Amino acid sequence: MENLFCLRCNRELEAGHKSVAIYMFAQTVGVRPRQKSAARRICFCPQCSVSLAMGPPPEGALNIAAWQMIRDIVGADPSLTEAAWEDLRGFAGLPSATGTDGAARSGMGRYFEF
Ligand SMILES: [Zn+2]
């Protein structure tokens, strides 16, 4: 299985982790024989999905169409927002709700290097 990366922040998205995938392909209409492009999967991590959904509409008709789809699914269920929030807590080194903050703290130095 191919490794997937968030289109916006380039973070690797491990299989089974929460993310938003947009599937795109193009095909001709009214042309014989019908031409169809390969399908592409474009992925966004939870933070970028939520950030995009809550941000202003982007430039460009295609971007706006994708933005509206992301808004639809981010708004439909809080689990993506929760995943983004959990990641944010981890990156900031804040104690998690369960009190097991070892993993979060170990990620702290890496995050603040830049
Ligand atoms: Zn991202």
Image (cartoon, grey):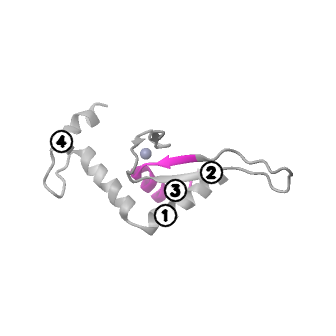
Tell me: residue 109, above or below residue 88. above
Q: Could you say which is closer to the camera, residue 33 or residue 31?
A: 33
Cβ atoms under marks 1 and 3 closer than 8 Å? no
**Bounds of the magenta span?**
41-59
Distance from disc 1 to disc 3, alpha carbons, whole Å, reads: 16 Å
Q: Mark 4 points at which residue?
A: 105
**Distance between the alpha carbons at the discs numbered 4 and 2:** 39 Å
Mark 1 sits on what residue? 73
Is label 1 in contact with label 2 (beta carbons under 8 Å)? no
Q: Where is residue 57 in the image (x, y as percent from the top left)?
A: 56, 56
- Disc 4 vs disc 2: which is toward the camera? 2
Residue 12 in the image: state x and y as whole percent. 41, 40
Q: Name the amino acid, label 2.
A: Met
Say which residue label 3 marks: 56
What x and y, as percent, mark residue 82?
33, 60
Earlier sequence position, callout 3 versus callout 2: 2
Q: Which residue lies furthest to the front in this view?
A: 1
Total labels drawn: 4
Q: Which of marks 4 and 2 is nearer the N terminus?
A: 2
Question: Comparing marks 3 and 2, which lies closer to the viewer?
Answer: 2
Q: N-terminal of the two: label 1 or label 3?
A: 3
Question: Residue at 45% across / 62% down in the picture?
Answer: 74
- CA gap between label 4 and label 3 equals 33 Å
Q: Which amino acid does label 3 sit on?
A: Pro
Q: What residue type is labelled 4?
A: Arg
